[in-house]
Image: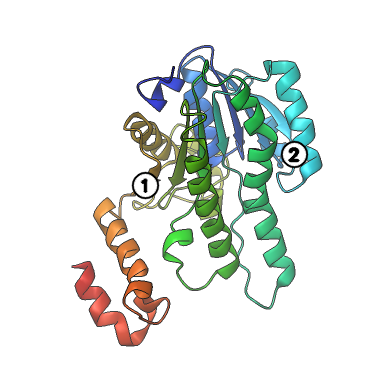
């Protein structure tokens, strides 16, 4: 039988598998899981960061999530060392470099990591999760981006990849609803978070501010720490929410909802795409946001 709340997965003896887990939100999630007494396995491409993950937090595995062959080896490790048990699967690995339409190679890299890092994770590891359902409660957390919803101009490759991730998460949630109701799916959409992708020191968090100091950078007031995002995720999982749209210290939940509603209105109202950023719509968009 399924638990009353997906957040009940955070308990001693359960197993968490986290990609992109050597820094940022992934590492913060690994520490939260370890704090509950869970067995944790993190995967990352960065060997240097993996080496810094404390042994009492997680076991580690180096891999490239965009390579199908690497996933086969990762699955084998989970089967051999963790008995094939996965209670929490966090498909969090991603890359955020900017690429324009004149860089097909850049598009290929972004799409391979951000999309196939999720697709391969689902196709290789979902069978392990299903095999223990419904006896074992499980959750799948997929990290998306607000840019995959509102699609701001300037980074078409990244935006397209995260729009695809949103679609994949929605489809997965729908597909599992009947045959495997004990497996919940959650789309984690962080706000501005102080990680390596956003200007912070990779590996630094609220409890490791020395990392930021070493990078000679001070966290601005607006972004959340990765730990804040993970706390919000746990809260929304407890509420059985698929959508985990994180605010930050500058953007509120209400602002996010209005931005998303305006973007959807481009289609409904026949406006030009990305109207929120076009001169002819700026006054109307600003009034809508008020």
Q: Residue 63 got which mark?
A: 2
Q: Is residue 151 left or right of residue 197?
A: left
Indicate the secondary structure of the residue bearing disc 1.
Answer: loop
Comparing 71 with 42, the one in front is: 71
Query: Please, which colouring scheme is shown?
Result: rainbow
50 shown above or below 65: above
Q: Nearer the viewer, residue 133 or 280?
A: 133
Question: Residue 86: image x %, image y %?
Answer: 59, 23
Quarter of the rendering occupied by the N terminus: top left
Q: Residue furthest top?
A: 13
- The x and y percentages for residue 268 are 33, 72
Residue 250, image x, y percentages: 30, 55
Given contact means CB atoms under 8 Å apart, are the residues at marks 2 and 1 in contact? Answer: no
User: What is the quadrant of residue 267 in the picture?
Assistant: bottom left
Pointer 2: residues within 10 angstroms few (<14), some, or many (20+)?
some
**For the point 46% across and 16% down, which residue is it?**
11
Question: At 51% across and 53% down in the image, what residue appears?
Answer: 167
Q: Is residue 1 above or below residue 28?
A: above
Residue at mark 2 to residue at mark 1: CA–CA distance = 28 Å
Q: Is residue 266 visible to us here?
A: yes
- Say left or right for 28 vs 96: left
Residue highlighted by disc 1? 246
Left or right: 237 as drawn, with respect to 22:
left
Q: Residue at x 72, y 71 (%)?
A: 104
- Provide residue 77's location: percent of width, then percent of height: 75, 24
Residue beneath the point at 34% across and 53% down: 222
Please give the count of numbered marks on the rendered protein. 2
* Sequence order check, earlier mark of 2 and 1: 2
**The residue positioned farthest toward the bottom in the image shown:** 280
């Amino acid at each position: 039988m399924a638990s009353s709340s997906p957040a009940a997965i955070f308990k001693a003896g359960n197993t968490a598998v986290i990609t992109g887990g050597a820094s940022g939100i992934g590492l913060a999630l690994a520490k939260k899981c370890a704090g509950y007494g869970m067995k944790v396995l993190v995967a990352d491409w960065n060997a240097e960061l993996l080496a810094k993950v404390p042994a009492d937090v997680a076991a580690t595995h180096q891999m490239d999530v965009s390579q199908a062959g690497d996933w086969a080896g990762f699955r084998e490790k989970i089967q051999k060392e963790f008995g094939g048990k996965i209670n929490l699967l966090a498909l969090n690995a991603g890359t955020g470099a900017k690429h324009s339409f004149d860089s097909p190679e850049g598009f290929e890299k972004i799409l391979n990591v951000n999309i196939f890092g999720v697709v391969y994770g689902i196709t290789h590891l979902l069978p392990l999760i299903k095999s223990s359902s419904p006896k074992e409660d499980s959750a799948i957390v997929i990290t998306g981006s607000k840019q995959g919803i509102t699609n701001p101009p300037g980074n078409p490759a990244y935006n397209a990849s995260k729009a695809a991730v949103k679609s994949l998460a929605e489809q997965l949630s729908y597909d599992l609803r009947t045959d495997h109701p004990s497996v919940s799916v959650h789309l984690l959409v962080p706000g501005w978070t102080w990680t390596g992708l956003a200007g912070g020191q990779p590996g630094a968090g609220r409890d490791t501010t020395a990392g930021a100091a070493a990078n000679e950078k001070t966290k601005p007031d607006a972004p959340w720490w990765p730990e804040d995002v993970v706390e919000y995720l746990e809260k929304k999982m407890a509420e059985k929410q698929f959508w985990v749209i994180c605010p930050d210290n500058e953007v509120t939940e209400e602002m996010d909802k209005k931005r998303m509603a305006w973007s959807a209105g481009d289609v409904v109202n026949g406006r030009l795409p990305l109207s929120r950023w076009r001169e002819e719509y700026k006054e109307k968009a600003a009034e809508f946001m008020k």
